[in-house]
Image (cartoon, rainbow, N blue to C red):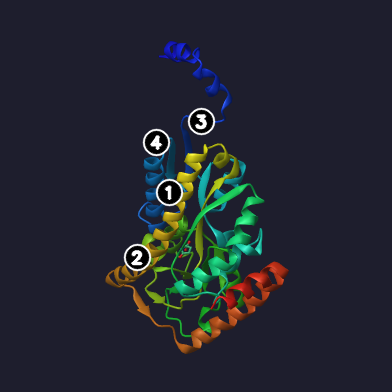
Amino acid sequence: MKRRTFVACAAAACLSIATAPVLAQAKWDLPTAYPISNFHTENIQQFAKDVDAATGGKLKITVHPNASLFKAPEIKRAVQSGQAQAGEILLANFANENPIYGLDGVPFVASSYAESRRLYDAQKSALVKLMASQNIKLLFSVPWAPQGLFSKKEIASGADLRAIKWRAYSPATARIAELVDAQPVQIQQAELSAAMATGVIEAYMSSASTGLDTKTYESLKNFYDLQAWIPKNAVMVNMKAFSALDAATQAAVTKAAEEAETRGWALAQKKNAEYKQTLIERGMKINAPSPKLVTDMRKVGVTMQGEWLKSAGAEGVAIMDAYKASK
Ligand code: PCA
């Protein structure tokens, strides 16, 4: 086989093989932090299949779910440095690097899917630019669901959260805990089940999807549908890995990414309704939050919106203005 390749290479075609920067077949690893059954993961698996089909197998993307290759906070750096060619991150996890990453994690800026979409449109060009400055290219971004409160005990007001052992997944969710005097512990989803089972965690804010993924109903029985914010995941690729593809393969990736984004937004909404129903069937009490709890959490939101604007400066003000003007 080797010999035949060598003989073929002696022909004229060999020259173009030697000079063109085109790879016969590329392989990308794509680590994610969420389980295989999660709708984000399902969407990404479909993206990988679509790319495979559209490129006739020239680009093979292997999805590594459930933090099996890198833990959630490590995935971004792995893609930046090229340890993984591609990866999925929760944007809000990186708010300490740049407030632009944290905007969709600020309570009560955007809490319906329609608002979340408008916020994405307003923030997208800044996000793309910021990522490009870090050697990464944004492929697509898909929302989670409006965030509510899971809790062991019943919660009727912000004061009921005082001293509670609170799971945070991002700087913003840790800041909420500070503002309501809870005790924050940073825990990513892959470790959450164990943290609840051992009593390390009594409450957290997230979505029905995560409630189901982590079997929260076995430990915490109350869910208050606060619809406080909608964080997004982003699938991205190392800039050099993308540039190394030929033009047709790049175009196939871009097209599949656009389709994955559209499909993901629809899937997120459809699945959220199903997940909430399943949670109820598994013993979760899903309640509308009391007016007092809503007022208290909105106050937290106002404080955090002010903090965000301050930290994000003129660029942040411009994004917020564009978002508000898009109504
Ligand atoms: N689930 C993820 C982030 C947001 C969400 O809904 C989590 O709880 O880790």
Residue tagged 3: 23
In this rendering, the answer to whether 141 lies above or below 108 is above
Dot placed on the residue nearer the N-terminal end, 4 or 1: 4
Q: Disc 4 residue type?
A: Gly
User: Going by the image, does 35 lie left or right of 307?
Assistant: left
Q: Which residue is mark 1?
A: 65
157 relative to 35, above or below: below
Q: Residue furthest left?
A: 281
Q: Position of residue 19 (x, y in %)?
A: 58, 24
Q: Nearer the viewer, mark 3 or mark 1?
A: 3
For the residues labelled 4 and 2, the Cα–Cα distance comes to 30 Å
User: Given this view, does label 1 or label 2 mark the residue nearer the observer?
Assistant: 2
Q: Earlier in the sequence, mark 3 or mark 2?
A: 3
* Residue 142, horizontal then vertical, whole percent: 46, 60
Q: Residues within 10 Å of mark 3 (few under 14, many from 20)?
A: few
Q: CA distance from mark 1 to mark 2?
A: 19 Å
**Which one is closest to the eye, mark 3 or mark 2?**
3
Among numbered discs 4 and 2, the one appearing first in the sequence = 4
Amino acid type indicated by mark 2: Lys
